[in-house]
Amino acid sequence: MVVGERTLLDLDDTYAREVPALSVPWPAVTAPAPRLLVLNDELAAELGADPAALRADVSLLVGAGAGTRALVYAGHQWGVYKPRLGDGRALLLGEVVDSHGRLRDLHLKGTGATPFARGYDGRAAVGPMLREYLLGETMHALGIPTTRALAVVATGETIERDRPLPGAVLCRVAASHLRVGTFQYAAASEPGALRALADHAIARHFPDAADADRPYLELFRRVVDAQAALVARWMLVGFVHGVMSTDNTTISGETIDYGPCAFMDAVDPGTVFSSLDKTGRYAYGAQPAILQWNLARFGESLRPLDDVEDVLEEFPAAYERYWAEGMAAKLGLSTPDVALSTDLMALLHAQRVDFTTFFRALAAGTARDLFLDREAFDAWAARREALLPADRTGVAAAMDRVNPLYIPRNHVTDAALEAAEQGDLAPFHRLLGAVGDPFVARPGLEDLTRPAPAGAVPHVTYCGT
């Protein structure tokens, strides 16, 4: 699509052509007064689009006149199988080949009810869409595989939730929108499409697996490894996804669907933010086990193509390896030490120490001040000291390169989004600038590094995105 001589996006529809049974053509509702709130210029250029053209005409970013499609999938949500979920308020705009030669999806969220809307209005609000933009950019800057937002556009309409809210559409970019739930739906409801879906996933994400003696077994092995690496990275930064249903588990190994997610402050494996998670199913400490459970459902879906499920036994070792290597880097060690790292997490939990603050303080030599039981910290620190290299030059700097100073603190994020709903985007952009370069200290941003004040009301998130 072009405006004058300026390219917006060169869209393709390979998924719709290769696996037509797993999506339906569906138009976006008309946005009465679309207005661009935020555009990711860097990502636009990477996708081969002219940012100025996207600013001049936002119609594509709300799906106007585009051949959009609603994707269908199934999923286990809160442990209960739902045979037909799908994009209730989202549409696949198409695919583009980016500047690195990678095929990437463009997906719109908040474009109105689809055949899979299950009675909901299909709209989205400004606050939650900006939140997904912010969280995606945070994860990208932290080096964690993630979907990202190209833009958020205000629609000019008011939507009704617990209170009237300004409406918005988010344009999301992903390696694909193939989920474990996509395979669950194909296996149960469109078995004739299962092989085409698996072949599409291999060609798109793991092309060399096509040459394996058992390509579908190799597909499963690659997804298990990618997801083990992903959940380890979540754990290493204190990220709680909040709704790890199988329809939110990607084949690509990207983080997707930033709903009731947040970053943990004080270390507690039972940390839950979602208002819906009454049992702690998706708590911080439960995430690796839940991910393995989701992958077991993926293996079951692939069973008509090959018996792959024994590969799932590789997950615990892969996860521990990725986590231990990441913890070694965070602690300034050249060799992982699982016992030291595990004991640290237990100590931080017992002492209610802020997760993000601790590692920066450790590099600065001030971590002891964070503990009430300083003798317990001293005992642990002596064990770490024995594992450090004789030449400590550069250790602290190396730690600061992997331990973020800035994360989207929950109380700061809420305040920024509340301001944005009232039309003031300055706090949002200030926070976005900080988390977009999270390892480098800058004057004037000290308030963004602090956890919520003592005695603050516990943070609660909702499935607003």
Image (cartoon, helix red, strand yellow):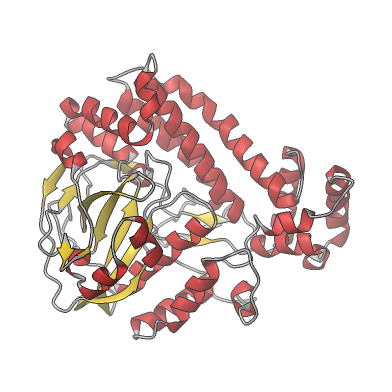
* Picture quadrant of residue 349: bottom right
Residue 256 x %, y %: 38, 51
Between residues 103 and 114, which one lies in front from this camera angle?
103
Report whether 409 appears left or right of 215.
right
Between residues 97 and 220, which one lies in front from this camera angle?
97
Which residue is at 10% across, 58% downward? 27
Question: Quadrant of the image for the N terminus?
Answer: bottom left
Residue 411 x %, y %: 52, 75
Question: Quadrant of the image for the C terminus?
Answer: bottom left
Which residue is at 15% across, 54% downward? 68
Taking 187 as reference, is 164 above or below it?
below
Residue 129 x %, y %: 33, 67
Residue 52 x %, y %: 28, 72
Between residues 88 and 460, which one lies in front from this camera angle?
88
Which residue is at 13% across, 62% downward? 28
Report whether 293 appears left or right of 16.
right
Taking 83 as reference, is 461 above or below it?
below
Taking 80 as reference, is 444 above or below it?
below
Q: Residue furthest top?
A: 213
Between residues 457 and 116, which one lies in front from this camera angle?
116
